[in-house]
Amino acid sequence: VRGANTTIDYASTSLVNSIAKISNHLPCRAGFRETTTVNDGIFKCAGCARGTYKNFDGHGNCTQCPRGTYQNMEGQTACIPCMAGTYSKFPGENVGCTLCEQGTHQPDIGSSACLACPDGQQNTPLHHFCENCPAGKFSNITFGSCMTCPDGLFAPSNGMRECNICPGGFESN
C-alpha cells in the first residue's frame, strides 16, 4: 500500500506481529499453565485450578491431584496428602479429605479409602486406629461402634463381638 510518503508492506507487518506473539510466549512458572485469548492469540499464564497442580517451570498442563490427596487453592505446585483418619476417593479433589466413617479407620497419610474395624472394636475419635470395646459392650461390622449389651445379655471382657446370655438366676445391669 502506498500513500503520501508512507509505504506499508503487509507481509512484513504480519511477520513482525508473529514474532512479537512468539516472543511473548514465555514458559509459565510452576503452578501455572498456558492459555491463549481467541481474539488476539496472545499466550498468557493462568494458575492451575483447584484440585490440580503443575510442579515444573515451562510449557505443559496442570495435572489432577491423585487419590489420597487434594488441593483447595489455585496456582499450586503440589497436592496435599490426606491426614491419618481421612481419605479422598477420587482424583482432582478440590475441597479437602473426608473423615473416615464410623467403624472405620486409616492409620496412614495419603489414603484413598478407610479400613473397617474388626469385630469387637470401634474407631478412636480421630479415626486413626481401632480400639477394643470395653466390657459390657460389643461391636460387629453391622454396628461399627460399641453398643451396650441389651437386658439379659452381657459382655464379660473387652473386645467382644457379641453378648452372652446371662446364666439362670443372673441379670445384667
Image (cartoon, rainbow, N blue to C red):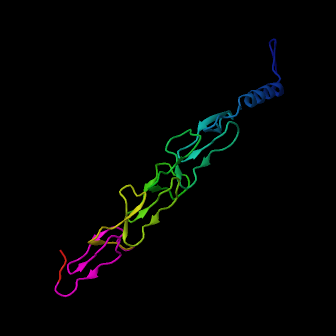
Considering the image in quadrants, where does the N terminus appear? top right
Residue 110, percent from left and from top: 53, 53
The part of the image, by quadrant, that contains residue 145 is bottom left
Describe residue 141's horizontal placement relative to residue 57 as left or right. left
Considering the image in quadrants, where does the C terminus appear? bottom left
Residue 166, percent from left and from top: 23, 83
How many badges with numbers are in the image? 0
- Whether the magenta-drawn stretch holds residue 158 is answered as yes
Residue 81's place in the image compared with 7, above or below, is: below
Residue 115, percent from left and from top: 47, 65
- Whether the magenta-drawn stretch holds residue 156 is answered as yes
Describe residue 56's horizontal placement relative to residue 14 as left or right. left
Residue at 39 percent across and 66 percent down: it is 103
Q: Nearer the viewer, residue 32 or 120?
A: 120
Residue 13's place in the image compared with 4, above or below, is: below
Describe residue 145's horizontal placement relative to residue 95 as left or right. left
Residue at 42 percent across and 60 percent down: it is 129
Residue 13, percent from left and from top: 79, 25
- Name the outermost residue toward the bottom: 168
Assign the magenta stretch its main secondary structure.
loop
Q: Nearer the viewer, residue 65 or 41?
A: 65
Residue at 43 percent across and 57 percent down: it is 128
- Name the outermost residue toward the top: 5
Q: Nearer the viewer, residue 130 or 72?
A: 130
Describe residue 157's horizontal placement relative to residue 168 as left or right. right
For the magenta stretch, what is the residue range? 141-169
The part of the image, by quadrant, that contains residue 19 is top right
